[in-house]
Image: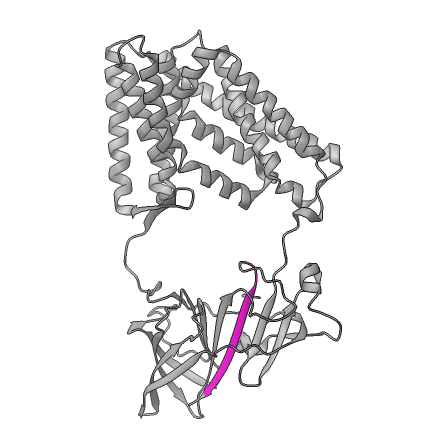
Amino acid sequence: MDRTRWPSRAIFGNLDLVQTKERNAVYFDLFGNLLVHYSSLWVMPLSFFISTLFVVLLVLALGLQKLTLRGVALGFLLLYVNVLVTSLLSWLLWKAVWLFRGGLPIEAVQSRLLMLGFVVLALGTPSAVYVLMRNRSSMFDLGVGALLWGLILMVVTSIVLSGGSFLFQWPLLFSLIGLGCMMWAPPRKSSLNLLILGLCAVPAIVPVIPIIYQMFVGLMLNWIPLLIAFIVLLFGLLMPQFRFIIASANWVLPGVTVAAAIVLLVVGGLNKYGNTEQQPSSIYYALNTDTGKAVWPSDPASRDKRAAALFTGGEQMGMLADFAYARTSREYSLGSAPVASLPAPDMLVIEDKSSDGVRAIRMRISSPRQAGTFFVFLDSKADVLKTLVNNKLIDDEGAASPAPKKQQGLRIDGFPQQGLELRLQVRASEPLKIRLVDQSYGLPPLAGTAPQPISDFTFLAKSFSL
């Protein structure tokens, strides 16, 4: 559905997103099973605590001669070199795949197989560099030097982008704990060191993996150097773990990861991409309960076999005027659809009174079929002076723009099952015409459709005259 002409006024359920004064929140999910969230008020104190812990660890380790400033500087420089080398190598390999195939379809740009190959490469290349440097500095030197990058990025994100600060705060915190425990752990206790590093790696890795995948989905492989740079920086916070594995197995980790990356990239580059990976097109069902007419809106340019089965000829180009703000939308190919037995959006007028030419209406709007998104459109020629939803003032223009609005529209996401109370103060010389539209995922149970709950939508419209 085209959304370019929906009004800018929008709220989420019972929450007024325009007038809220609550602080922003930092949140991330753990593989979709648990949402971790806390107020952004904690971002700076947490960054200060982690920075203090870093400085204390650095001073104590230097005093006990477990670190050298030269070694820390080498570790800091080495991670920078790793980011540059790995990003450049990934860019060259991506261009090689592109040239070998003579251009790639969109399915290849979104290939998870190729992405996995580049991620494995981001592990193998830095580990190879560290194997070469393992005799020039201690594990603690290189680890603290790499963590210094995490400290800098943590401070920057905490100030500029507090919502993304968790990407560096939690990995850095647990890496510092693991590194500190190893510095003062009893010698020759490799099993204990491995256990400590493993436990500290879990909270450092788990929040990051979903972010890497989301970046891949958003940026795709055309931005692979940026993705790889981000991955290498994050993996740099796990340098103590890498150094422990490298110290035990030398070239095993670099050899295995580089070989696996080559195999994945070759297979991904030779793969035949086609319709098997094509994303299904969206299908819309729009029913005007006033006229009893329903249509299948479609974009012919992106119509797949599933959508084409609904159109047997006789379609016409037109707008979805009954479902759009100001009755204007983009053009669709409209095919006739059967009328589904669905309850229309409803409105109950609680109070309607006039004073000095201003009409104050209090009503309750609801979606009997419990749609998740709700639209309210005012089709009359009227000046809207004030709008309140559940006694909360909605004004996207602010106090600086007191002029009345000629057209009024609300989009309500997360529409509550019990409905909402809507109040309007308008100045009008004709009866008010209010149009309600509710939107839900999926399609009604009609013959001939194979619904996709995520990409399909059902719209119902009903008008009221007051």
Frontmost residue, 340 versus 324: 340
In the figure, 99 relative to 240: above or below?
Answer: below
The answer, for residue 306, to whether it is visible in the render is yes
Quarter holding residue 21: bottom left
Q: Which residue is at 63% across, 58% downward?
A: 281
Q: Which residue is at 70% across, 42% downward?
A: 273
- Does the segment drawn in magenta span residue 462? yes
Principal secondary structure, stretch drawn in magenta: strand
In the figure, 243 relative to 334: above or below?
Answer: above
Q: How many marks?
A: 0
The percent coordinates of residue 47 (x first, y second) are: 28, 35
The percent coordinates of residue 15 (x first, y second) are: 33, 64
The percent coordinates of residue 17 (x first, y second) are: 35, 63
Of the 4 image quadrants, the one containing the C terminus is bottom left
Frontmost residue, 251 versus 230: 251
Of the 4 image quadrants, the one containing the N terminus is bottom right
**As drawn, is 273 to the left or to the right of 155?**
right
Frontmost residue, 57 versus 216: 216
- Does the segment drawn in magenta span residue 70? no
In the figure, 230 relative to 136: above or below?
Answer: below
Quarter holding residue 74: top left
The percent coordinates of residue 447 (x first, y second) are: 63, 70
Frontmost residue, 121 versus 70: 121
The answer, for residue 303, to whether it is visible in the render is no
**As drawn, is 116 to the left or to the right of 197?**
right
In the figure, 37 relative to 283: above or below?
Answer: above
Identify the image's colour scheme: rainbow, by chain, secondary structure or one colour: one colour
Magenta span = 455-464
